Amino acid sequence: MDNVTSGFGRAKLGILLALFALVQTSFARAQNAGAAALREVTDEAGRTVKLPQQIRRIVSLAPSLTETVYALGLQDKLVGDTEYCDYPPDAAKKHKVGGAINPNMEEIAALKPDVVLVVKSLNRLETVRGLEQIGIPAYSADPHTVVGVIASMKRLAEVLGAEDAGGALDTKLRERLAAIHAKLNGVAPTPVLFVVWTEPLMSIGRKTFIADVLEGAGATSVVDSKQDWPQFSLEEAVRLQPEYLVFASSHSETVHNDVEALALKPGWSALHAIKNRKIAIVGDAINRPGPRIVDAVEELARQLHPEAFAEKN
């Protein structure tokens, strides 16, 4: 009897061991399948990001990246963006997840994105880390020049599975940029002061993509600073006497009214650009390192150097 019981026990143990081995094998296969479904990419901040093979759901935390998603024809995959994402107009209709600096993490998680798109110079590292903690990958863009913006959009297109659209956009923008540079060939750069804010006076540093936009448009900033958004002395501006003041705004009438008010203030009234009303106003695309960046270059270049763009008979 004991032999029978012992044999039965051994058989039962053998069955349990076999079942355990089968479960282990199935679990290992599921793990391998899950690993195979992911791919690793390196974003522009140098981080390794694990993404699904196919991106189906996107959240953008930067207006420039929202514009890029639309330019690549991927707007149907954009399930959420920020309160400041307003171009193209359809972007304003997308589900809002708050601002770029303090987005609502619960709103983002509820949208179940495959990837969240961020810009290193705009979005906070704490946001990226917070997303990682809840298992949502974030891909960071970090362009610093006009050409860098174009290259960044092409890389993003590859990450999002839109290589053909990215290649076409890259070619179109590079050709347009080359045509602008050809028109400005031999033209002396115009000294300008890019005004971010008037009180206190703030401008842009040498390493910003806006400074590169100025250069591409045949201008050079009189501000020489390593800071991205430095405060600048009005007395120094008067000493340097920029030929033009450059403002970014989609409301040119408001800027002109502001200039009229500045002309009455001490210090500002001593600027020749104010006296002579040499004011260049560029649309808000100049503030967004996205698909309209070449528009900003051309818009400014035409104002500073109209003779280079005059139609030749």
Image (cartoon, rainbow, N blue to C red):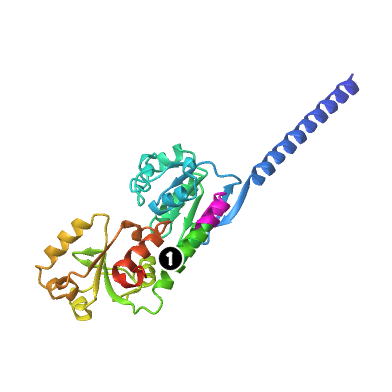
Residue on which disc 1 sits:
146
**Does the rendering let one see residue 115?**
yes
Does the magenta run of residues contain 159?
Answer: yes
Mark 1 secondary-structure assignment = helix
Relative side of 204 to 125, left or right: left
Does the magenta run of residues contain 198?
Answer: no
Provide residue 187's location: percent of width, then percent of height. 36, 78
**In the image, is residue 121 above or below residue 137?**
below
State which quadrant residue 98 falls in. Answer: top left
Between residues 201 and 146, which one lies in front from this camera angle? Answer: 146
Q: Amino acid at mark 1?
A: Val
Identify the magenta region: 155-169
State which quadrant residue 229 falls in. Answer: bottom left
- The quarter of the rendered structure image containing the N terminus is top right
**Does the rendering let one see residue 144?**
no
Between residues 56 and 121, which one lies in front from this camera angle? Answer: 56
Residue shown at the point (75%, 38%) measured from the top left? 25
**In the image, is residue 240 above or below residue 54?**
below
